[in-house]
Image (cartoon, rainbow, N blue to C red):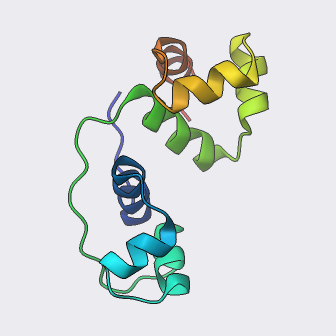
Amino acid sequence: MGIELTKGEELWVQRKRLNLTQKQMSVVYKVALDKYTHWERDERSDHIHTYKVRDLTGGELSQILRRRVGMLQSELALAIGCSETWVRMMEKGQVKANRLVEYWGRNDK
């Protein structure tokens, strides 16, 4: 399932992959923390240079789609019939995220 990421989502994925905080990423981009935070939320349209994110993991895909529709991990867990802890582990990449990918494929939001 391929989706088009917003600039903010690209920043978010990059930050998560680098295991950095928003404050640390603001230093990387040499901007104030609040400016970076607005970028990541797609609340500012300043010029932002991001690297094209490739090959989203199932967990990354789930987090992005879940955030887009305003769904909590607990709600997703209920929808797919597992625990919130299990959803968290799938989204973090600690266990395979097949159930999440299957859910979002069926429920293309």
Q: Residue at x 49, y 74 (%)?
A: 23
Query: Is 48 situated left or right of 60 in this image?
Result: left
The image shows residue 13, relative to residue 30, as above or below, that is above
| Callout count | 0
Q: Relative to 28, is 20 above or below?
A: above
| Residue at 44% over, 35% down | 61
Residue 9 position (above or below residue 80)? below
Relative image position of residue 41 (x, y in whole percent): 54, 68
Q: Image point 70% across, 27% down: which residue?
A: 76
Image coordinates of residue 33 in percent, x first then y, are 51, 83
When asked about the image quadrant of residue 103, the answer is top right
44 horizontally vs 54: left or right:
right
Identity of the residue drawn at 43% across and 64% down: 8
Q: Of 5 and 83, which appears nearest the observer?
A: 83
Instruction: Report x, y in % for residue 10.
Output: 35, 57
| Side (left or right) of 1 relative to 40 | left
In this view, the residue in front, 22 or 2, is 22
In the rendered image, the quadrant that contains the C terminus is top right
Q: Quadrant of the N terminus?
A: top left
